[in-house]
Image (cartoon, rainbow, N blue to C red):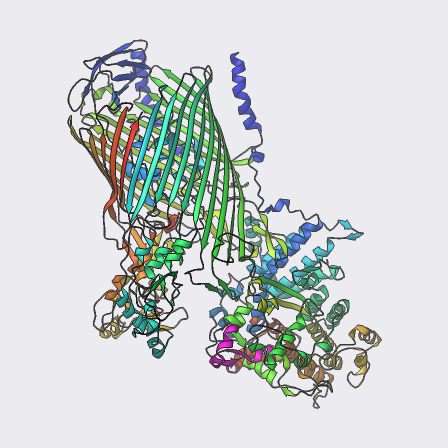
Amino acid sequence: MKTIVRMLALAVSLTLLALPKAQAQTAAQADSSVTIRGIVLDEATGQPINAATVRMKSIAVYTNESGEFTLKTKQPSTMMEVTAPGYDRRYIERRGRDFVRIYLVVAQLSNPMGSKGQVEVVTKELIPEGTAVSTVEDISLYTPMQTIDRILETRLGTIRTINRSGLDDIGSLMYIRGINSLNSESQPLVVVDGVIMESYADYESVHDGYFANYLANLDMQDIQTITVIKDASSLYGTKAANGVILIETGRSKDVVTKILVNAVAGTSLKPGTIPTLDAEQSRQLFSELYKDSPYSADEVSKMPVFNEDPNFLYYNKYHNNTDWSSYIYRNHGLHQNYSARATGGDAVGMYALSVGYVGNKGTLDGSDFSHLTFRFNSDLEIAKNITTAVDFTISSINAETRNDGMVSKTSPYYMSQVKSPLFHPYQYSKSSEDRNTLTSFYEEADDLGINNPLPVQEESEMGSDMTNFMALLRPNWKLNNSFTLNGLAGYQLDKMYEYFFTPHAGVAPFVNMADGHYEVYENEVKAQNMREIRYTLEARLNYQKQLDGHNIAALLGYRFINKDRSWTRASGYNTPDDEQRFLTTSLIRRKMTGEDLHVKNISWFVNGNWDYMQKYFLNAAVSMDASSRFGTEIEKGALKLFGVNWGFFPSVSGAWQISSEDFMANAELIELLKLRVSTGITGNDDIPDYMSKPYFVSHSYIEKANGLILGNLGNPGLKWETTVKNNVGLDLALFRNRISLSADFYRHHTYDLLVQKSLDPIAGFDNYWANDGELTNTGFEVALNARLVNTRDFRWEATATLSKYKNQVTHLTDGAFSTTAYDGEIRTMENQPIGVFYGYKFKGVYASEAEASTAYTKTDGTHDYYYNMFDNGSTAPVKAGNAIFEDISGPTGTPDGIIDEYDKTIIGDPNPDFYGMLSSSLSFKDLTLTAVFNYSLGNDVYNYHRRVMESMSTLNNQSLAVINRWRADGQVTDMPQAVYGDPMGNARFSSRWIEDGSYIRLKTVRLAWDVPYKIPFLNDLTVWASANNLWMYTKYLGRDPETSVSNNPLFQGIDAGLHPQCKSFILGFKLNL
Amino acid sequence: MKSLRYLFIALPLLAFSLVSCEKMLSVSSNGFLYAEDNTLDSPNDSLYSVAGILAKMQLLGDRYVMLGELRADMMDVTHNATEPFRELSSLHISADNPFVEVNDYYVVINHCNYVIQHMDTSIMVAGERYMKREYAVAKAIRAWTYLQLALNYGKAFYFEEPILTVEQTQRISKDASLMKTKDEIIDLLVDELLPIENVNYPAYGSISKYSSGSLFLSVHYLLGELYLWRNEYAKAAAQYYAYINDESKKVDVNNRCTQHLLTESNTRTRGTNIYQTETAVVTAKWLRLFDLGSENEASAVIAYYYTIAFGEFTNCNLVNYTKNKFYVAPSQRALDLYLNKTYDSFTSEESVSTTGDLRGYPCMIRKLTSNAEFIDPWDFDEDESKMAQVPYIDLYKEELGTYYIDFYGREEQDYVILQRATLGYLRYAEAVNRMGKPTLALAVVNRGLKSSTISDSLYINQNEVDSTLKAQWSLAKFDDNCGTVTRGQGATQRILFRTDLVTLQDSIEFVEEVLIEEMGLESAFQGNRFHDLQRMTHHRPEANYIGEALSAKFPSRRSEFMAKGEGDWYLPYPGEE
């Protein structure tokens, strides 16, 4: 409530500020026509530009050969739009002048800041001037391999994007201005042509390390603009807490038929791997580990690995030096992307038709995919004043996958890292005569239980197919000059089918004794089907009025969304043989799960925009949302109307374009100066479905019967999360746009966080979902663009962005809690950011017994060992060769010489201190060389991959780093000794595995040549080549510090060894027919 | 014209706004049934609801046995045991011990409450208030569950309102007046059960391998136990007799251990080695006393069923605790109790005499490796030399024959016995003994109650029996009854009154001690021991049977145990210090 009052006060004061002035000027300028003269010149050469268009509101004139124009209007505005073929669009403020000199710049890399006012926003949303918004247009200039999340990473820089892995279509996590939720959706809302997309962030793939990336359904060539709204000024109330990305697809604007063809082909190189021990080194490690294993010395000496007799029948099997990574990677991947787009039409109908194909052969064998997209956008005139858009889209993604990362025992990469080099992927002949001959038969899983990656990679059958269909009708009825009625009816169908099969061959059978039932799992089959249908109905009544310099726009809208999702997953073990790779009735441990989910939303929204002479802007908007997920008895903050609870999401924003003021007439240095302020409330309705009402579910009872059991305890008070967003921004452009700067400061406060709270046991449920808890995100975003050189032939433009957010959990009712992931502990606690790592502080290794035995100084001055405390309460002295962990505290609050739970502390924060991008664009004549870097500073990464490779607690092969392990008294090293089973917990979750994940990466370098020659039938031709991920500077020891194992923000910054981003080289051309 | 145009705009907008938003936003799912739609007004509804309660009862099986046995004298932890088990065994039980959680009890109670409140008992089918039967099932289960809470914690929240919302949970949990003591709860339960003591239970036929009747608790049996806790012996005896008579339960002479010792042959095809020993054969057959498919002694169980074909099931963990993980084992006290007995021939055809009560074989001599980690039975074939003989409990998980024949078609059933015929007889004996009929009580142990015994003054002091009693036990259906002890120790008259007993009270106390031991031997490791000892102590506090029994398990802690009063044995109630 306080916030609403504050916002109203702001709105009123902004109005008062603007109005008196406005009235005074209105009186003076009423009913007098104005003549503006000017000249349009090329900035580089100073030459006049002929046939440039100068537009003020609806009046447009062209420049003559001398670049001059004269514009007469009865409705003067302060802003002129100037366009000319081959030049960047410019907006010129009149500032009371009668003569203006206008310089245009040859079109080049679009301004990555893309702040509003400098680019055209074709989106039909009323995006007010005070909004914190970023826009990208002309996507097709960029490497068409990428999905839009990666475009935003390289174009905007102010969105924190984290590639989930290096697989080409797996997408990125996007965090706009920090993390605004603990347990609910934290990804931005994506709206394509007015229709809300589903993020599928909660979709659980059957493949380890694979994510469904719904953005891969959009072909880059179809995208016209991307507008990112970062503050509260959207009309998407309960869905906008994480920001909104509005995407407009391309439509035909011209009756002339145009054909655009893109063709791209390229290759990627296999990624680096963590170097592992070779045969001799691993044999040495084995011998040390066996010392502490359950095997006796006699048994160990008889092991075939140590049998050095070349006449031993199986000598060959155990005496290889295999580089396993060479078997799982191809040397080169192959990318292909072809697309064609035709636009045109006539007076009645316009169309844009496009088809696209992407084919990808990944460097990791078994990561191939193909995309096929088809889009038909049309605009029809049905009657006078009535038009409609009719759009269809079909896309299909077929991806082959393999389990990825260091988690899955059937991940080829995992196996290639931990499998001993002593073994070979193929069997040696078993006959004693030719036992040195390799056969073509795969070797089985080895004696240590590690599978053979080759058959797993080649005989597995895993994949993910996604098919999407969207049909859209957008009628538009112009009622009169002031009123327009817009409608939208959208139908979306998303289908996902995933299949999974791991073979028996080469894979060690998994023996399950867990529940006291002896079971052997040989091969495994899974399949998952998901279908989601969404209907969107929307109606908007728009009002527009221009009067004496005042522009008023308002709209009243209604939106209804119905979402139906159903999914089933089936799995089982042991098909009759490896040739049968599908679900059969003969499987054991058959499991079927699924859900039938339905969600409905209603939203009403009102928006009012006012500006005077494009100097003063004011916007107020309110949306009112109701959802089937909300409880029926919400106590606070909801409006009960028509039998349901409504959330209420107002926002106010204002802007003052100072540079438009007449008093700026002589400040020619300043091209643009604008102050923006906004405040408002948004929400997050990602409440687990059906949580507000009690229900019963079916539960199987002794196989033959089904019982009804209570599946949920109702909480009718459940509601959305609320995020209040405040923003202050400044846009500044100097020296005829040579330097431009956009800066924003923001503060988000989220309350009513959806959390699980504990409950009295009498209900029989441990926890329930409730709204409790608060967090804040404060930060800034700065984008600087400089056109450093601008001559006729040579141009250089550079951009830099710098962003920071500080995330802090400010209130948790049930106190701090830990979440375990990848054997690590993630702590959620008050006054700390989301996702911090919690564990022991690693301080090295005791070099000598003398050092270890005197490490702890008691209160009486005597010395002793530190002691490790184990789960069963026993202790053991920490001797030489073991890890040193800091003794931080004890039961009495002071260090006690015992290393136990009390010594855990925060050891890392995955949130970056700063992040952003740098880009440079150099043009010489028709050649343009662009380089884009992105960076992240100060983010910690939990290197689980390294932990697996350096723990030395099993007989797995380890990384080369372990050759520095402690082996003799006095040896100074930070690598502890190798002990089977790691009884002293040297490899426990500690700061030993937390690394600084800061990096700067040359994301892409691109050379484009606009072929200047006239070629028959071709309007223009661009040939380009790009190289991606060429260079990275980081101290991070893993393969790629940019990784995310999960869509859950708690688990950001965990490196589970997923496929890293690889170097790739791409050649393409683009032609217009 | 213009106004017509606005009408066009206004109409759809109006239509949008007038449709009730409540209806527009209502959603349902094929995945569940809203509580408001679960009306329980048809026999099918009630069947599903009862199955739901039984499914939730499965969560209580492990705990019933562990709380009932590990806290008592006949079960002990092994070196494998984790902290929660160690705590139970040593009776130093902390509030965060998972066995102390009460959630699962209240889940069962809450489901019963829902059925009891919503069941439409007015529906008539074939002239009977059909759903009254399920209503009674739910009431009996609720009573049993409350009794467990009361006995374990000494108190519980007693409420009959089904909890469906968070708000209800918070309201009820704050209402201190709902927290009742053990005695208050027992009184409430008696009042609850008396109106339904003669209601017929539903007969669903067989579910899986179980007959549905064995899944429901007998109300008479429950009332018998409640009256025993109130020291109302005559009422208790009447209820136990009603249970025995209604269900025609007997201590069948045909189910003696020796029977199987002599007749069992090896029919198994895999893993036969360990079952070929004489003792193992006894085990296998002894367990079939409780085979739910045939003439059986288990009259109410918590049933589990497991098949490798399907992924989802509620597991009985007892086989893990007793075998695979080997957390718990027979205590030395249990071994002593069994081994201090002998078996002598029961009939002239037999000529067997051996050390120990044969009923102890399930727990006494089974093969485990020397470090007592579970070894798959198949491995025994390979290397018997690795094994030492370690006693362990082999009561849980009766593998069906298919296990050994077809690995892939494997299915198993398991159950925790809550009500048992023999125990019904022994509790009947407990009641009549306290009524002043020690010879009648002892006859249950020695000879079995039947026409030939009841009138025979050699075994039963005829002053203790009247014509009603005689009529009760002269029914032909009891003719196969034998003394409970004879099935493990043979001979028809094992236990004689000591000669030093002077008064009737002496005899009663003597028989009481016999019964305590006999209950232990007969129903070891089945979950009854701790409360049996508590209840006997409740009859005669000065004897402190429970303190004595635990002192036998931990001789060094005798003074601590003997000093404990009735209220000192309860578990800490979660959330309270």
Figure quadrant of residue A1073: top left
Q: Between A353 and B374, which is closer to the camera in this rendering?
A: A353
- Where does the image place residue B71, in percent across and percent down from the top left? 55, 73
Q: Looking at the image, is A798 positioned above or below residue B567?
A: above
Residue at figure coordinates x 76%, y 61% from the top left: B198
In the image, taking residue A1 as reference, residue B251 lies left or right, namely right
In the image, taking residue A368 as reference, residue B408 lies left or right, namely right
Numbered-mark total: 0
- Where does the image place residue B4, in percent across and percent down from the top left? 54, 14
From where the camera sits, is residue A98 visible? Answer: no
In the image, taking residue B187 as reference, residue A187 lies left or right, namely left
Figure quadrant of residue B196: bottom right
- Where does the image place residue A174, in percent across and percent down from the top left? 35, 42
Q: Looking at the image, is B149 positioned above or below residue B45?
A: below
Magenta span: B361-390
In the image, farthest residue toward the bottom: B499
From where the camera sits, is residue B87 visible? Answer: yes
In the image, taking residue A1048 as reference, residue B490 lies left or right, namely right
Task: Please say whether residue B380 is one of the residues in the magenta stretch.
Answer: yes
